[in-house]
């Protein structure tokens, strides 16, 4: 494990293991914030963990290397926070990487996820992007989010709908969370500095376009500068000179990806001048559309090529339809899938010089008799302040587990124990857990909406100005838990004006309505962000609430938890509740996937 730079911090028995990531500096100003501490200058090779934020300056770029081989690169003026870094049970199979991006541009190269429990998700102010082995860019500008996919497929979730974006496509999620139409990636974005920068990094100098930015291994000006004046041509016919082709390179003819220095010399003297180097051949870019991409067998799908060659060269095409059949040529193609299944269609394009590119899309074919089976509403868990509201989406699935699309507009939402729903938005006032129900064509799904209670500040100690800190749950307890089974919670400490970023602050957990039968109920915060309380157990069935308190700090709002009888009526069950908390949401995900 040391060879890949991953260190495990176990929490909750063997249910999960915390992981680290590694910061790499690509130039300019980069700062790191540990939890809620102050920003400090980033150092190459620094280990990053959950709760850390990386912020790049106006001239700064950085990359984050994850424990599973995935990678994130950050552009200028970007703020990126690591939320979850962990493996579940088997470290080689199940892994969860969740982050949030407040502003700026990022690029992600994601290792293939091999099981349903694994996920790689990035949340922005208006959208969430989740993937399964792919490459894509996220650009956040004044609240809107652009998702551009270079490899594989990305699922983008806005406020009302989820869509799949395939390689060569992009979508813009507006400030209202509405997902715009899926379209081909614009030439402005493809040829822009950020995607070019990442092409150079992923595929080497040959993938860089003329005039685009330097690769991450060299300076942004393209490397050592060549002569600023061209040498004059000489020959028996006299002297001739021309302008230099480049003086700084910047990833083009004068220096690709921080490599060779600028090219000197005229474009050709009248006699004896040196001619310019030939313009490099640029590789083609593959892209196509497929209609429809989901339906019952037999399913006839029409494919339309959207590839282009930057040099304007004619392209040859080869289609592979994912069921063993293939064909060559043609800007359009049609294929019929007779059997249910999941088929990956690949288009490979080549130019006359042999340079090629390929892209793929997934076609999902259900059985001919597949009919509506159930719906899933999301989010499954949410927390609001008293009087706040939360919007929900609903997705329908057939008997084969295939998605039948977004049905939010046709779903009836309700809430208990109090509150109200208007359309797909539900509001509640009374603190505690409430159940939101979505009903569509006779089937219902449920979600938990928790209303937090504003807690009064703790009384100040003598000769102190309070409150100086505020406590809140970073990871809340499960809503339902078998008696005697272990679970974990995490408390976040926010430093107020009179508090010290170094602490120390002694924090205690309390159980309203009973007592803990085991686990860590006290800990000291020393400025390191999140405080863990592990192996907590409650033996007696009933309804309780957990809160955290400390001198000179506002207490965390009580979090409800219901303790049920263990298997076969026994109170003690053993094991770890964290595994259940992490696995239960994926039961719903498993139902959703074909």
Image: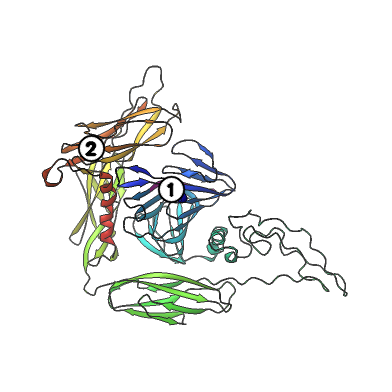
Q: Nearer the viewer, mark 2 or mark 1?
A: 1
Q: Evaluate whether residue 369 shows in this view.
A: yes
The single residue placed furthest to the top in the displayed view is 463
Q: Position of residue 579 (x, y in %)?
A: 27, 48
| Secondary structure of residue under mark 1 | loop
**Contact flag, marks 2 and 1 (Cβ < 8 Å):** no
The CA distance from mark 2 to mark 1 is 30 Å
Tell me: residue 74, above or below residue 500: below
Residue 42 magenta-highlighted:
no
User: Left or right: 358 with respect to 440?
Assistant: right
Q: Earlier in the sequence, mark 2 or mark 1?
A: 1
Magenta part of the chain: 76-85
Q: Position of residue 424 (x, y in %)?
A: 28, 53
User: Left or right: 287 with respect to 424?
Assistant: right
Q: Position of residue 330 (x, y in %)?
A: 46, 82
Q: Which mark is residue 6?
A: 1
* Residue that label 2 marks: 537
């Amino acid at each position: 494990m040391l060879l890949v730079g991953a260190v495990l911090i176990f929490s909750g028995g063997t249910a999960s293991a915390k992981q680290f990531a590694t910061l790499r500096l690509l130039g300019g100003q980069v700062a790191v914030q540990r939890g809620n501490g102050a920003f400090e200058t980033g150092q190459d090779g620094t280990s990053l963990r959950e709760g850390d934020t990386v912020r790049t300056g106006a001239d700064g770029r950085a990359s984050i290397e994850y424990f599973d081989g995935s990678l994130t690169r950050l552009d200028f003026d970007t703020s990126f926070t690591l939320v979850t870094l962990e493996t579940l049970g088997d470290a080689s199979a199940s892994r969860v990487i969740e982050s949030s991006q407040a502003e700026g541009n990022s690029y992600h190269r994601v290792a293939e996820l091999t099981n349903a429990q694994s996920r790689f998700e990035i949340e922005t102010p208006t959208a969430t992007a989740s993937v399964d082995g792919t490459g894509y860019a996220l650009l956040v500008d004044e609240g809107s989010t652009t998702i551009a996919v270079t490899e594989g497929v990305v699922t983008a979730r806005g406020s009302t709908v989820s869509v799949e974006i395939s390689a060569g496509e992009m979508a813009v999620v507006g400030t209202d969370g509405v997902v715009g139409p899926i379209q081909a990636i614009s030439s402005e974005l493809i040829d822009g500095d950020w995607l070019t920068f990442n092409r150079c990094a992923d595929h080497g100098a040959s993938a860089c376009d003329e005039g685009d930015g330097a690769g991450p291994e060299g300076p942004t000006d393209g490397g050592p500068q060549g002569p600023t004046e061209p040498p004059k041509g000489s020959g028996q016919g006299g002297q001739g000179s021309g302008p230099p082709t480049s003086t700084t390179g910047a990833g083009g003819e004068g220096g690709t990806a921080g490599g060779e220095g600028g090219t000197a010399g005229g474009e050709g003297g009248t006699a004896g001048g040196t001619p310019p180097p030939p313009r490099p051949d640029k590789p083609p870019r593959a892209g196509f559309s497929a209609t429809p991409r989901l339906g019952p067998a037999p399913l006839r799908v029409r494919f339309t090529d959207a590839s282009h060659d930057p040099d304007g060269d004619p392209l040859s095409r080869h289609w592979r339809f994912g069921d063993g059949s293939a064909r060559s040529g043609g800007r359009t193609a049609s294929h019929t899938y007779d059997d249910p299944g999941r088929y990956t269609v690949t288009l490979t394009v080549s130019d006359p010089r042999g340079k090629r590119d390929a892209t793929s899309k997934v076609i999902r074919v259900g059985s001919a008799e597949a009919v509506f089976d159930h719906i899933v509403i999301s989010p499954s868990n949410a927390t609001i302040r008293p009087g706040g509201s939360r919007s929900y989406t609903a997705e329908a699935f057939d008997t084969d587990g295939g998605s039948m699309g977004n049905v939010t507009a046709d779903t009836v939402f309700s809430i208990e124990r109090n509150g109200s729903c208007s359309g797909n938005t539900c509001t509640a006032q009374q603190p505690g857990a409430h159940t939101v129900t979505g009903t569509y064509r006779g089937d219902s799904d449920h979600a938990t909406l928790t209303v937090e209670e504003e807690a009064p500040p703790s009384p100040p100690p003598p000769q102190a100005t309070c409150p100086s800190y505020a406590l809140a749950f970073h990871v809340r307890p499960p809503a339902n838990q078998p008696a005697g089974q272990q679970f974990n919670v995490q408390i976040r400490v926010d430093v107020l004006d009179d508090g010290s970023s170094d602490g120390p602050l002694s924090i205690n957990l309390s159980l309203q309505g009973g007592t803990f039968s085991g686990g860590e109920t006290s800990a000291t915060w020393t400025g390191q962000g999140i405080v863990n309380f592990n192996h907590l157990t409650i033996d007696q069935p009933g309804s309780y609430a957990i809160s955290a308190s400390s001198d000179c700090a506002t207490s965390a709002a009580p979090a409800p938890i219901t303790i049920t009888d263990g298997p076969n009526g026994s109170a003690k069950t053993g094991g770890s509740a964290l595994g259940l908390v992490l696995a239960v949401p994926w039961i719903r995900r498993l139902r959703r996937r074909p």
